[in-house]
């Protein structure tokens, strides 16, 4: 009822209409939070994407295995973004606005739109946190957004090993190099930096992977690592990535190693309000 009431008050806002479907059909918490005006609320902005991730949840080529979420099909206006973001940041408990949701592509591809939206939002309110979830492909855009008023960033990573990263992400016109640069730029600009680490037992807890992850975080420190289960058909995933034999430490072993190596880094599963 709350969803329908709010949408009826802003019938011209296409983002709200899209989020209503996410909230009611998919049970998406970040969509629901927009309507309840609390915590982290998602604002999708990008129908385009620059990798072709094997397990993409918003777009799949195969018709036999449709994606579980419908990707946003339009590019919103600055006004549509601002009209959702400003009241949420100003009024929500621990208010966060996040670009880069599961129902969209890569938000940094909409760089000019985001720049104008973030600047406009920050001209109207300095409350709350503006966050972006990204694949880390465009460090220059993150630097510009940070200077416009972005507060935090979460960069998704499937593996610090290039062979596995490339096999799963299948990036176009970028690589792990740009992802690392994005993390470096974000820290330099004073953002709260999280890594969205998609873990899969038998891969992420393999000794070679764990050692590579430790080296990765030594070179690109972050404030928080969010451990997220990679929801994918195990047979499809394991057949698609190059995997060498090696000792398994277990997911508990992975977490223990990360905690031992980086005692001040948080291990969690969601974006924190700063």
Image: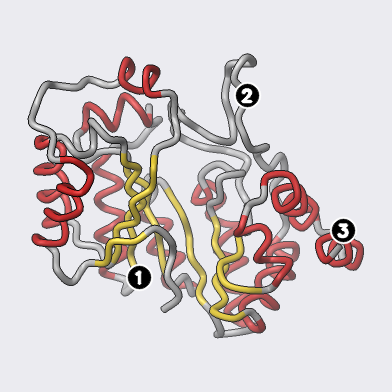
Residue 220 vs 241, above or below: the answer is below
In this rendering, is residue 248 above or below 233? Answer: below
The quarter of the image holding the C terminus is: bottom left
C-alpha distance separating marks 3 and 1: 34 Å
Depth-wise, is mark 3 or mark 1 nearer the camera?
1
Disc on the earlier residue, 2 or 1: 2
Residue 76 tag number: none
Q: Residue 53 versus residue 230: which sits nearer the camera?
A: 230
Residue 211 spot, x, y in % from top left = 9, 43
Kind of element beneath mark 2 = loop
Quadrant of residue 6 within the rendered picture: bottom right
Residue drawn 24% across the image and 43% down it: 177
Foreground mark, 2 or 3, reads 2
**Residues at circles 2 and 3 in contact by the CB criterion of under 8 Å:** no
Viewer-proximal residue among 82 and 156: 156
Q: Horizontal and vertical percent for residue 241?
A: 28, 21
Image coords of residue 150 (percent x, y): 47, 70
Q: Is residue 174 above or below residue 98?
A: above
For the residue pair 198 and 247, the one nearer the viewer reads as 247
Residue 119: which quarter of the image? Answer: bottom right
Closer to us: 64 or 18: 64
Kindly report which numbered mark, 2 or 1, lies closer to the viewer in this rendering: 2
Provide the residue designation for mark 2.
66
Q: Is residue 136 above or below residue 51?
A: below
Q: Residues within 10 Å of mark 3 (few under 14, many from 20)?
A: few
Q: Which residue is mark 1?
A: 192
Numbered circle sitting on residue 12: 3
Q: Residue at x 71, y 53 (%)?
A: 23
The quadrant in which the N terminus is found is: bottom right
Q: Secondary structure at mark 1?
A: strand
């Amino acid at each position: 009822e709350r969803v329908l009431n709010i949408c009826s008050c802003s019938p011209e806002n296409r983002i709200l209409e899209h989020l209503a479907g996410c909230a009611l059909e998919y049970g998406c918490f970040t969509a629901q939070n927009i309507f309840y005006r609390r915590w982290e609320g998602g604002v999708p902005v990008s129908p385009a994407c620059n990798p072709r991730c094997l397990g993409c949840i918003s777009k799949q080529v195969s018709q036999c295995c449709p994606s579980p979420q419908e990707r946003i099909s339009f590019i919103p206006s600055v006004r549509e973004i601002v009209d959702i973001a400003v009241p949420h940041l100003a009024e929500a408990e621990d208010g966060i606005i996040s670009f880069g949701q599961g129902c969209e592509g890569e938000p940094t591809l909409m760089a000019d739109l985001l720049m104008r939206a973030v600047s406009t939002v920050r001209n109207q309110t300095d409350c709350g946190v503006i966050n972006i979830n990204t694949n880390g492909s465009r460090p220059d855009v993150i630097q510009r957004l940070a200077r416009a008023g972005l507060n935090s960033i979460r960069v998704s990573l499937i593996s610090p090993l290039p062979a596995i990263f490339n096999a799963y992400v299948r990036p176009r016109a970028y690589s792990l190099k740009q992802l690392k640069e994005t993390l470096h730029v974000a820290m330099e600009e004073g953002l709260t930096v999280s890594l969205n680490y998609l873990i899969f037992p038998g891969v992420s807890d393999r000794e070679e992977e764990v050692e590579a992850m430790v080296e990765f975080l030594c070179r690109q420190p972050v404030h928080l690592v969010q451990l997220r289960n990679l929801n994918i058909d195990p047979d499809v995933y394991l057949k698609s990535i190059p995997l060498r034999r090696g000792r398994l430490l277990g997911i508990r072993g992975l977490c223990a190693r990360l905690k031992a190596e980086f005692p001040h880094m948080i291990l969690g599963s969601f974006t924190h309000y700063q």
